[in-house]
Amino acid sequence: MSPIFVKETNNLSLSRMEKSLAIIKVLDDMDSITQKQVIHKAGLEIAAANELFNFLVKLDIIIERSLGTKKVYSITEKGQRICGYFGLDDDDAIFDGSGIFRID
């Protein structure tokens, strides 16, 4: 599976909200995966990932659990409502038909 996001388009980096939505989208599609896997599937850079994950956990949008020695993440009901609100399940809303995040 290719990354959901295009890292940069025309030298414009993604906003914090776009990165957060990418994380939410990945976790809505896949449950209980590691932070590294989410970052890879979302096409994000690791640099600000911890801050974003902590922010989303604090807002109860995603949940962090321990699975043995690993930390895994899942989406909450609140996160699922956000997916519906932003149309993350509807490829025509934010994502184009190829699954790449549109930056218009």
Image (cartoon, grey):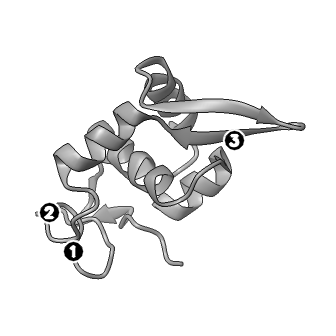
Query: Residue 72's mark?
Result: 3
Q: Quadrant of residue 59?
A: top left
Quadrant where the C terminus sits is bottom left
Amino acid identity at mark 2? Ala
Count of all numbered marks drawn on residues in the image = 3
Going by the numbered disc 3, the residue's amino acid type is: Val
Disc 1 to disc 2: CB gap under 8 Å: no
Which numbered dot is residue 96? 1
Neighbour class for label 3 at 10 Å: few (<14), some, many (≥20)? Answer: some
Q: Position of residue 70 (x, y in %)?
A: 82, 40
At horizontal 21% and vertical 65% (from top left) the residue drawn is 90
Please say whether residue 68 is visible from this viewpoint: yes
Q: Is residue 99 above or below residue 70?
A: below
Q: Which residue is painted at 78% across and 32% down in the image? A: 66
Residue visible at 30% across and 52% down?
Answer: 13
Q: Is residue 44 visible?
A: no
- Which of marks 2 and 3 precedes in the sequence? 3
Q: Nearer the viewer, residue 5 or 77?
A: 77
Q: Secondary structure at mark 1?
A: loop
In the displayed structure, 4 sits above or below 31; it is below
Question: Residue pushed farthest left?
Answer: 104
Give the distance between the C-alpha atoms of the residues marked 1 and 2, in whole angstroms: 8 Å
99 or 15, which is in the foreground? 99
Q: Position of residue 3 (x, y in %)?
A: 47, 70
Q: Looking at this rendering, what residue extends furthest in the bottom direction?
A: 98
The amino acid type, in three-letter code, at marker 1 is: Asp
Distance of mark 3 from mark 1, alpha carbons?
A: 28 Å
Around disc 1, counting alpha carbons within 10 Å, would you say few (fewer than 14), some (14 to 19), or many (20 or more)?
some
Q: Quadrant of residue 50?
A: top right
Task: Please state the horizontal and vertical placement of residue 27, each as a whole percent of the image.
Answer: 50, 50
Tag in front: 3 or 1 = 3
Q: Earlier in the sequence, mark 3 or mark 1?
A: 3
